[in-house]
Amino acid sequence: MENLPKDPYMLLSVINMKLRDEFSSLDELCKTLDVDKDQLIHTLSDAGFAYDANNNRFA
């Protein structure tokens, strides 16, 4: 997650934008950007957000 913001709210914004505009799933985003999915989920979960697969976004 080196190229992504460290601040969880900025991270949320970037990830949701990429999910909306570029990737059809969290798995695709993580694979393409070489992001550890578990670490991403944990980081955003600590800030109070959970991934919603039906809407392909963190909320």
Image (spheres, rainbow, N blue to C red):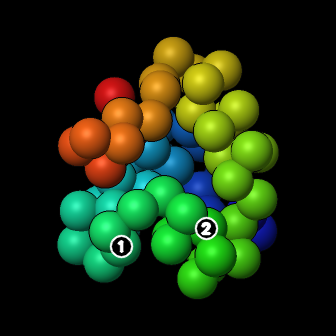
Closer to the camera in the image, 8 or 33: 33
- Which percent across, then down, holds residue 29? 51, 70
Q: Quadrant of the C terminus?
A: top left
Q: On the image, numbered disc 1 is attached to which residue?
A: 23
For residue 52, above or below residue 5 = above
Residue sitting farthest toward the front: 54
Q: Secondary structure at mark 1?
A: loop
Which amino acid does the dot numbered 1 rest on?
Phe
Question: Whole-Å distance between the Cαs marked 1 and 2?
Answer: 9 Å
Q: Is residue 33 left or right of residue 25?
A: right
Q: Residue at x 58, y 82 (%)?
A: 32
Asked whether the viewer can see residue 1, the reply is yes
Q: Is residue 42 left or right of residue 28?
A: right
Q: Residue at x 69, y 53 (%)?
A: 37
- Which percent across, then down, holds residue 14? 41, 58
Tag count: 2
Q: On the image, numbered disc 2 is attached to which residue?
A: 30
- Which percent across, then down, holds residue 50? 47, 27
- Which percent across, then down, holds residue 9? 46, 37
For residue 8, above or below residue 3 = above
For residue 25, above or below residue 58 = below
Which amino acid does the dot numbered 2 rest on?
Cys
Q: Residue at x 44, y 44 (%)?
A: 12
Q: Secondary structure at mark 2?
A: helix
Q: Quadrant of the N terminus?
A: bottom right
Asked whether the viewer can see residue 3, the reply is no
Density class for disc 1 (Cα within 10 Å; few <14, some 14-19, many ≥20) is: some
For residue 32, above or below residue 45 = below
Closer to the camera in the image, 52 or 34: 52
Q: Is residue 14 left or right of residue 1?
A: left
- Say whether disc 1 or disc 2 marks the residue closer to the N-terminus: 1
Q: Residue at x 51, y 49 (%)?
A: 11
